[in-house]
């Protein structure tokens, strides 16, 4: 059966990707490390291992969120970033520090601050985006247009807040706000991993529904899917994943777009479990490999997000030009 | 299946106004009428795709609102006209989705057998591993019908199944609809624009005008010069072809 051979080919592709990721991860940990000196070795590991983990977790969060989001709104050239989910997270984080003060427990304890941000983000995003989807009846163009406006809207409010803030408070805020791949927020790693694992467990069954949802609203309802409820649930999962990624490494636009589309191109399937896995593996490989290049070749002169944005921009244009129907 | 006093308003404008009729079991029923008469909206409300403002859609003694969605999807299938898929999906995979109400995506060998039968019934064997977006309009429509067959429901609702098809494929589509009823014993309900297809291939016709039922009855009862002229506001002649009243309008 051709369908079965295609399945097996996909499993093989994913396996190869997985091995590549493992190799990249091992290289990232070991390149330039003095293995003979035990003390130096463990010192390097303590520095590198959390960073590596953060990258892997982020790649999974962004890859999964992007695939799910694209399938929900039935368009493969959008990412949650285009709707301003990143900016929303940054705004909420700023607002919490602004209201509570940088000395409060909410700002000092990284995990607590993260948890509060997540809850607020979940609620705000459900209200805003849930309403947006409902109001526009999932019309991609409107959703994107309003999303773009929302991105600058959230950005402006956040900007205003930081300007009226006490400079000392702002200084404290800044260190958590400008996370990047070279300066990851590893403190919240454990909580983030637990959260993502929770999301995977809770929403695992929804993936089968997501396969049906890509057939369109009418078909999904015809096949017995509670469409509106399912969309709301999946949107919550997307929001939380984006929040986790943004909290750890800051906003990365285009990343989701690239890895989701690479995964779709490589696997050519409707099975979301495979698509998400593919996107996550692509993301891990890109991030770990890119970070290695940044650290050892460019000596931190250029952050990895610059490469991702440049590469992503070009890939985005390529998608626009080759897609017959966007 | 009984429809009682259906009402639907968009922005204060009433598009479906107190529609009541009964769907005869094991027959082909066509809903016809001019544009904006509300036939597609009625179809949407019967199939739970469109929310209603008032009224009842009683299915097997229970309002469809009170049915569990996945249970209803084992009894009633709807095929609408707009089916764009972004995914890379083969014909076989699409047909396999017809089993989703029963298996939630985990198909057993028996399901595979039902899927194969549906594919064979629609003569899609040679295309079964092709991607949906590489098929012609007629083939794609047949793939969707195969999915509905795999869904194995007593009731099949088709919203303008001949839309965007040429005469050859549209006529084939109508023959398939007839076979769904005659060979597989399904109750088929269609929204049709082409009156003569409705006359030739259905048992009953429900004609709509201005959001109300203008006439419900057997083909012979509805396909009269007077009724059609009143509904469509153009002149009609009726001619018998192969024992069926077909209309000529000009």
Image (spheres, rainbow, N blue to C red):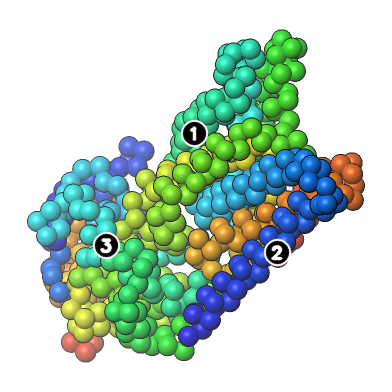
Give the distance between the C-alpha atoms of the residues marked 2 and 1, in whole angstroms: 34 Å
Asked if residue A296 lies left or right of residue A56, the reply is right
- Residue at the (25%, 83%) spot, across then down: B179
- Residue A190 visible in this rendered orientation of the protein: yes
Residue indicated by mark 1: A122
Q: Secondary structure at mark 3?
A: loop
Verify CB contact (< 8 Å) between mark 3 and mark 2: no
Q: Secondary structure at mark 2?
A: helix
Q: Which residue is nearer to you in this view: A63 or B206?
A: A63
Pointer 3: residues within 10 angstroms few (<14), some, or many (20+)?
A: many
Chain holding disc 1: A
Asked if residue B2 lies left or right of residue A167, the reply is left
Q: Secondary structure at mark 1?
A: helix
Chain holding disc 2: A
In the rendered image, residue A319, in percent from the top left (x then y), is placed at 70, 60
Q: Are marks 3 and 2 on the same chain?
A: no
In the rendered image, residue A185, in percent from the top left (x then y), is placed at 68, 34
- Residue at the (47%, 49%) spot, across then down: A200
Residue indicated by mark 3: B73
Q: Is residue A237 above or below residue A123?
A: below
In the rendered image, residue B49, in percent from the top left (x then y), is placed at 32, 54
Which mark is on residue A20? 2
Chain holding disc 3: B
Q: Which residue is nearer to you in this view: B155 or B5?
A: B155
């Amino acid at each position: 059966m051709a369908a079965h051979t295609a399945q097996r080919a996909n499993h093989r592709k994913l396996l190869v990707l997985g091995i590549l990721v493992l190799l990249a991860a091992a290289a990232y940990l070991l390149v330039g490390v003095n293995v003979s000196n035990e003390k130096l070795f463990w010192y390097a590991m303590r520095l590198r291992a959390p960073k590596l983990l953060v990258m892997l977790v982020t790649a999974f969060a962004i890859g999964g969120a992007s695939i799910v989001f694209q399938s929900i709104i039935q368009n493969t050239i959008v990412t949650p970033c285009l709707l301003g989910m990143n900016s929303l997270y940054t705004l909420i984080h700023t607002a919490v520090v602004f209201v509570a003060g940088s000395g409060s427990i909410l700002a000092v304890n990284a995990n607590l601050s993260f948890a509060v941000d997540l809850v607020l983000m979940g609620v705000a995003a459900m209200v805003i985006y849930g309403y947006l989807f409902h109001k526009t009846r999932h019309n991609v163009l409107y959703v994107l247009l309003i999303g773009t406006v929302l991105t600058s809207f959230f950005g402006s409010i956040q900007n205003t807040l930081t300007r009226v803030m006490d400079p000392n408070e702002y200084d404290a805020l800044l260190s958590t706000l400008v996370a990047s791949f070279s300066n990851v927020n590893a403190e919240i790693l454990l909580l983030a991993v637990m959260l993502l694992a929770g999301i995977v467990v809770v929403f695992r069954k929804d993936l089968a529904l997501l396969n049906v949802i890509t057939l369109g609203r009418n078909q999904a309802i015809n096949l017995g899917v509670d469409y509106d409820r399912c969309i709301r649930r999946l949107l919550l999962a997307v929001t939380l994943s984006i929040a986790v990624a943004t909290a750890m490494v800051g906003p990365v636009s285009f990343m989701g777009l690239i890895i989701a589309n690479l995964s779709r191109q490589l696997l050519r399937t409707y099975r979301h479990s495979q698509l998400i896995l593919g996107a996550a593996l692509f993301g891990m490989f890109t991030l770990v490999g890119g970070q290695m290049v940044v650290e050892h070749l460019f000596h931190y002169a250029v952050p990895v997000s610059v490469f991702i944005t440049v590469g992503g921009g070009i890939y985005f244009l390529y998608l626009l030009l080759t897609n017959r129907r966007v | 299946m009984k429809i009682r006093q259906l009402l639907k308003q968009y922005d204060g404008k009433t598009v479906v106004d107190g529609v009541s009729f009964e769907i005869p079991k094991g027959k082909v029923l066509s809903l016809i009428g001019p544009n904006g008469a509300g036939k597609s909206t009625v179809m949407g409300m019967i199939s739970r795709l469109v929310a209603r403002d008032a009224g009842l859609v009683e299915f097997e003694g229970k309002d469809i609102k009170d049915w569990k969605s996945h249970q209803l999807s084992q009894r009633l299938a709807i095929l609408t006209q707009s089916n764009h898929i972004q995914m890379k999906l083969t014909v076989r995979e699409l047909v396999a989705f017809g089993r989703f109400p029963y298996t939630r995506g985990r198909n057993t060998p028996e399901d595979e057998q039902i899927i194969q039968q549906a594919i064979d019934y629609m003569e899609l064997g040679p295309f079964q591993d092709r991607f949906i977006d590489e098929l012609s309009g007629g083939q794609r429509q047949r793939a969707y019908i195969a999915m509905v067959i795999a869904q194995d429901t007593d009731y099949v609702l088709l919203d303008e199944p001949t839309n965007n098809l040429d005469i050859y494929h549209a006529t084939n589509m109508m023959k398939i609809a007839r076979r769904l009823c005659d060979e597989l014993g399904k109750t088929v309900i269609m929204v049709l624009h082409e009156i003569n297809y409705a006359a030739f291939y259905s048992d009953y016709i429900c004609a709509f005008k201005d959001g109300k039922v203008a006439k419900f009855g057997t083909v012979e009862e509805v396909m009269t010069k007077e009724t059609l002229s009143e509904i469509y506001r153009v002149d009609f002649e009726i001619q018998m072809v192969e024992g069926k009243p077909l209309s000529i309008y000009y």
